[in-house]
Image: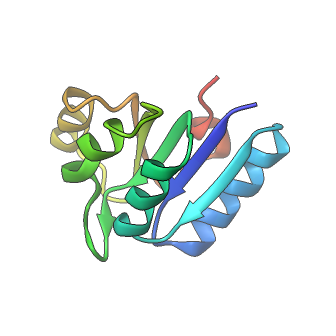
Amino acid sequence: MAQILIVDDDKIMCDALARAIKRTGHEAECRFSLKDGLSEVSSGYYDVVYLDVRMPDGDGLKNLPKFREAPSSPEIIIITGFANSKGAELAIKSGAWDYVKKPSTIKDLRTD
């Protein structure tokens, strides 16, 4: 069972993704700001972090290295409603496992 953290200011998206993750037998937590997400990933164990790009308190892409440096070294999947090729390239070069445009189907967001 994987431990998954979702960092997205869109509560509806976060809740829907968390429900879908839990239906597959994994654990999911939501945080609605970069500050809270970084605090959570630094103090807990997570296998995967779904990280939004445009957050009220900063840019998820710019903060991606901080999430990767968490003690559990989680895989990072960028989720964004504003996808573009430059953002995708930056995400992958910064160590993201994947870059997914919202709204996506739950199938697109799965890691298996």
Q: Is residue 34 above or below residue 89?
A: below
Residue 34 x/y as whole percent: 35, 64
Question: Residue placed at 81% from the left, 37% from the top?
Answer: 24
Residue 50 coordinates in the image, percent (x, y): 49, 47
* Colour treatment of the image: rainbow
- Residue 103 visible within the image: no
User: Quarter of the image containing the C terminus?
Assistant: top right
Viewed as shown, does residue 96 lie left or right of 108? Answer: left
As drawn, the residue found furthest toward the top would be 112
Of the pair 41 and 104, the residue shown nearer to us: 41
Q: Position of residue 88 (x, y in %)?
A: 26, 37
Residue 107: % across, % down: 66, 37
Closest to the observer, 23 or 32: 32
Is residue 36 in sight in this rendering?
yes
Please name the residue shown 47% across and 64% down the image. Answer: 8
Kindly identify the residue that appears in the image at 49 percent across and 44 percent down: 49
Which picture quadrant has residue 27? Answer: top right
Q: Residue at x 30, y 65 (%)?
A: 54
Q: Quadrant of the N terminus?
A: top right
Out of 93 and 87, give the one closest to the viewer: 93
Residue 92 in which image quadrant: top left
